[in-house]
Image (cartoon, rainbow, N blue to C red):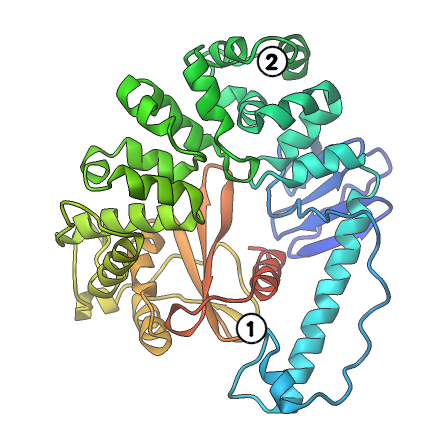
Amino acid sequence: MKNMKSEFKEGRWGEEFENGKLYSFDDQSVVVIRAWPPAAWRRCEENGWRRCSDVEDFVLRIEHSSTLPGPEPPPPSVIPSDKIIALPTYEPQFSDEENLRIWHACECRNWAERRKDAAFWAPVPVAIRDAVSQYTYGRWRMLTLLTCCPQALDLHQSNPALLFALAHQDQFRQSPVRNLYRAVRRLVGEKQKKILGWLGFPATEAARKLFRKIPAGEVSVDGLRYLRELLSNPRLARMASHLPRLCEDLIRIFIMPELLATIPMKLLFELSTSEFDEAHTVVSGFEESRQLGLPWPRRLRSLGEAGGLCAYACWRGEGLSVAGHHSATWDDETLGLSFPEPPLRGTSEIVPIRSAAELAEEGKSMKHCANVFRGPVLEGKAYVYRVLAPIRATLSIVKDSKGWQRDLCGGFDNQPVAPEVMETCFKRLFAAGG
């Protein structure tokens, strides 16, 4: 970093890839990231260049193949109307020509981002890159740990959640070690139960087996904290041991006695084998119903019933905490509330919703329950954006211990958004910076 210029240019934002490094700019700092060997530096207005110990997950998008994409997509030729309707960016209010132009622009942006991501990750050994790509959270820590301790790849294969816990040992040990990599080199050949005990979890076979039920893409610091609480109750641990897979929200169900009592084992098994979004729906629906004083069945009969209850709570509910009180309606006082400044500035096509009145109008026009974000936005825990292109949608981000993260992106009447379009929307928003 000796050759880097020390001048800080306030207001510059976005991402650039040059000379094997990724440059991530916002209006307060610039982060320079090298994938191999991994290293990162941050420069703020008030400080010089300093080494970073962590990098936000949304910056570390992983291209699973190091092969660069082909040439830039050519301008589109004439496409029949029935094919244009099938485009992921199609919007009925636009003409065929405009829909085609939007789709092509989106394809070109995606191509440029794929090319940049592939070039950034190309130097990383395939085994390490493939391992890191499986984790949703903590990618930078996983990358640096596997680089310094490549023998830990065996632990990733057998118990990825345990390796994730090792990389985040400062979140679990009462006295975190200073030299993590030296400790990992010493521990990685030990029995997994010994590693669990070193981390502060029960050093038992039951705990080891529950860790193995968490896929790499679902493991998180909060989820492992919930698991430690679950392991303190042998009866709950035995129940959880019968499920094939676990995730953060499913673990939460076990440590919420009132909710757990309403879910038969058959539905718990169904939650474990279905998309993990179902477990999130159950937990959020129960919490929302309790906050609003709505009834919850003594016994859930199906996951569809849980989804209906969650949707009903959203429709009725508007009433997460607002200025210290609960409200189930949009009264004049509530509508007059202004939201804090948006954490990400947005773009001309992704516009921050700055007041309770705008949020109410968004929910009404899009026929969904965006209003449930009113409380979290006022508390600084979430923010909502109106997406105008490449599709009409509503997008939200949430704040956790690592900063602002992606949350939801939904269309009219809660219709799902195509994954590639959702990815584009989030990338544009985070590239805009704060």
Within 10 Å of disc 1 (Cα), the crowding (few <14, some 14-19, many 20+) is some
Image quarter of residue 426? bottom right
Q: Which mark is residue 178?
A: 2
Which image quadrant: the N terminus?
A: top right
Give the residue drawn at x 75%, y 57%.
114
What amino acid is found at the position of numbered circle 2 in the picture?
Arg
Which image quadrant: the C terminus?
A: bottom right
Give the residue drawn at x 66%, y 41%.
133
Q: Which mark is residue 349?
A: 1
Quick check: can you spot residue 52?
no
Give the residue drawn at x 32%, y 54%.
378
Quick check: can you spot residue 169?
yes
Helix, strand, or loop for circle 1? Answer: loop
Relative height, residue 425 to residue 269 (above, below): below
Q: Nearer the viewer, residue 55 or 337?
A: 55
Image quarter of residue 200? top left
Helix, strand, or loop for circle 2? Answer: loop
Q: Are marks 2 and 1 in contact (CB under 8 Å)?
A: no
What amino acid is found at the position of numbered circle 1 in the picture?
Glu
**Is 423 placed left or right of 114 in the picture?**
left
Residue 206, how many percent across, how many down? 41, 17
Image quarter of residue 150? top right
Residue 145, how many percent across, how many down? 67, 24
Give me the C-alpha separation between circle 2 and circle 1.
45 Å
Give the residue drawn at x 55%, y 13%.
192
